[in-house]
Image (cartoon, rainbow, N blue to C red):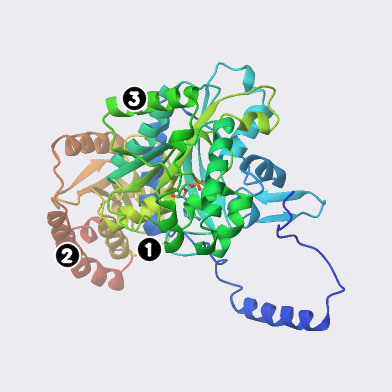
Amino acid sequence: MPKKKVVITKKTDKPAEKKVAKEVKKTKRSKKDLITVTGMRDILPQDQRYWEKVRAVAKQISKDYGYDRIDTPILEYADLFTRGIGSQTDVVEKEMFAFTDQGGDDLALRPEGTASVVRAYIQHGMLNNTQPVKFFYMGPLFRHEKPQSGRYRQFFQFGFEAIGEDNPALDAQLILMGWNALNDLGIESVIQVNSIGCRDCREEYKKALVKYYKTKSKSLCESCKTRISKNPLRLLDCKEDSCKEIKKDAPQILDYLDNNCKDHFMKVIGYLDELDLPYVLSPFTVRGLDYYTRTIFEYWAVDDSEGKNALGGGGRYDSLVKILGGREETPACGLAMGVDRIVAKMREKNIEVAEERIDVFVAQLGDAAKKKAMVMYETLRKNGSFTVSQAFHKDSLKKQLEIANKMRVKFTVIIGQKEVGDGTIMLRDMQGGVQEVIDFNKIERELKKRLEKYREGAVIDLTQGEENNNKMSGNVSGGINENEEKNEEIEATERLDLE
Ligand code: AMP
């Protein structure tokens, strides 16, 4: 278990000053009670289309390459991550949201996805399935990091894991999948690739690294001074300028790979060349989690000149299944993409994601018509070939049509008192402004027919649509408003004479 975890306890023997300090802290925090927790944020309705787009692309990629969806719990036993990710890593040592629950169990909000997927693979006996077993996941992760642009305490990833295969073609294909996802979203990226070898060759490399850094220890930052003995590979990840300078002459892992690891890596590179992927060999990329072996990679936007926010990354983790209690050595490889950063990049680059447009709006006027429209809506909603919307909470036809205009629907069907009486319905083409009376029972068929035609021929000119909509709402306010005030019972057709 991690020694430095955040544990909820009920100690009562705190010195008085500490108690006071805690009170102050509490008062401060209570002001913030009704806002999001530091480093966590709401994803508001107006932003959802970007997130949906990323999820849709991720799902498509999972289908294209045969990865099946898995959802694992957000809470796991904390030692899944201490054992899996490594107790000396930043993620486990400093960033895990870990606590002891009411029943005394040590739990953690998952800081990453791979360990949970591997746990599921072992727990459900998937070692006996045809290998590799290929998983796709999406969801929130939690790390208690210092919040800054592109770095949150709750963030989202989608990821792919292929467990039970060591063929280098799998590594290359996973690298391709992440790149394809970014490319399909309109983000140009470059892949940094490295191999950190197996445990054996890495040990030799670590020794060389320690030897080199010991000679430079005076010029290292405080964190790196402790990294020399605790986690030498992380020395290569330091963002301090002085340490970055020292890194330039550090030994490179590629010189320490044994023949098998070298051969494996050369094959991965060979596939990447064949696929014409934009990659660079990046001998100092090490990644933050201990379980990686051999191939590792990261995706960077081509215009991320500061190199601060990788968009995703992954690698091989051939020992993790065994570490987490699997019966035998089970090679595996995977990747995770950061959805928050991908969405931010899409917005930064003004990549447009079209809003989903509703096809048909159902409007009503008068109580009897509202009842009929509500029932009809249930049929239209299930039709499967067009989308519908409504505002049954509104009585005013003018208000409903304003809503329909805002949604830029293609058709509005309007049912009023007269229509209820004679079994008809008014169908209005919102772009052309043409409206016709249709037999109530034929409305679904007519809508389908018209929408099919519309889709075949439509090059939708939104400005034109807006003009028409504005024109129409002008007519509506002139006609309907007055009428509404005068007499609610007036004949529906008169009131719907919008032209
Ligand atoms: P990792 O699980 O550390 O390999 O991270 C994979 C990807 O997740 C990174 O390349 C980022 O895009 C994203 N990511 C990791 N940590 C955070 C964070 N704290 N906030 C936002 N995105 C993150």
**To which residue does mark 2 refer?**
475
Q: Residue at x 51, y 49 (%)?
A: 212
From this viewpoint, is residue 363 visible? no
Q: Which residue is mark 3?
A: 271
Percent coordinates x, y for residue 469 in the rendering: 18, 59
Determine which residue is flagged by label 1.
Answer: 395
Does the numbered disc 2 mark a residue whose Cβ is under 8 Å from ligand 1? no
- Above or below for 64 versus 410: above
Say above or below: 241 vs 377: below
Amino acid, disc 1? Asp
Which residue is found at the position 50% from the left and 22% from the top? 166
Q: Quadrant of the C terminus?
A: bottom left
Structural distance between the alpha carbons of marks 2 and 3:
64 Å
Element carrying mark 1: loop
**What label sits on residue 155 in the rendered view?**
none
Q: Are marks 1 and 3 in contact (CB under 8 Å)?
A: no
Q: Dot 1: few (<14), some (14–19), or many (≥20) neighbours within 10 Å?
A: some
Can you see residue 26?
A: yes
Residue 190, picture quadrant: top left
Query: Of marks 2 and 3, which one's residue comes earlier in the chain?
Result: 3
Neighbor class of circle 3 (other Cα within 10 Å; few <14, some 14-19, many 20+) is some
Residue ranking furthest to the right = 13
Q: Where's residue 482, x and y in %? A: 24, 72
Outermost residue to the front:
215
Q: Secondary structure at mark 3?
A: helix
Say which residue appears at 41% left-offset and 35% top-offset: 59
Q: Nearer the viewer, mark 2 or mark 3?
A: 3
